Amino acid sequence: MMGSRIKISALGVTMLLLLIAPASNAAISCSVVIKDLRPCVNYLTKGSGKPPSACCAGASALASATSSSADKKAACECIKSASKNIKPNNQLAQALPSNCGITLPVTISPNVDCSKYGWLRAWKLKLGVLGWA
């Protein structure tokens, strides 16, 4: 009887940890983010109208590759750093996802707060879904 209580308790703790732990610690590399968004640089700095199809294809690939909060935070930090160097047109950067018909999970800006993509936010969201927050 005592052994089964310990097994049930250990199982409960394990399930709780799986629910609140991030899915993966591996994150997208900055080189992948840069590769995906490189076709957008001219558009974001000097463009107008619709972005080129290669830009939208890269942005779409990035959106697909950033599923975990670790990926989103890493992509955010990379984009934030690159944005300081290329100085994108803010209106074009903000409109890029909608102009490409996608949802980009990170903001293209040198001033974005990348901490909102971290594990703590994901943890709070999971607790909220469970009704514990």
Image (spheres, rainbow, N blue to C red):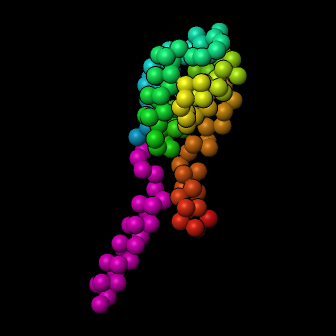
- Report whether 7 appears left or right of 64: left
Task: Name the spot of residue 132 as percent of width and height, x first.
Answer: 58, 68
- Report whether 59 appears left or right of 109: left
Task: Name the spot of residue 20 as percent of width and height, x first.
Answer: 48, 59
- Give the residue at the far bottom of this rendering: 1
* Quarter of the figure that contains the C terminus: bottom right
Task: Name the spot of residue 10 as percent of width and height, x first.
Answer: 36, 73
**Looking at the magenta stretch, what is its main secondary structure?**
helix
Q: Residue at x 29, y 84 (%)?
A: 3
**Stretch in magenta:** 1-25
Q: Relative to 125, does residue 72 appear above or below in the rendering?
A: above
Q: Residue at x 59, y 13 (%)?
A: 43
Residue 40: in magenta span: no
Residue toward you, 56 or 65: 56
Residue toward you, 79 or 7: 79
Residue toward you, 1 or 65: 65
Q: Relative to 120, does residue 91 appear above or below in the rendering?
A: above
Q: Residue at x 58, y 28 (%)?
A: 97
Residue 7: in magenta span: yes
Q: Residue at x 55, y 25 (%)?
A: 100
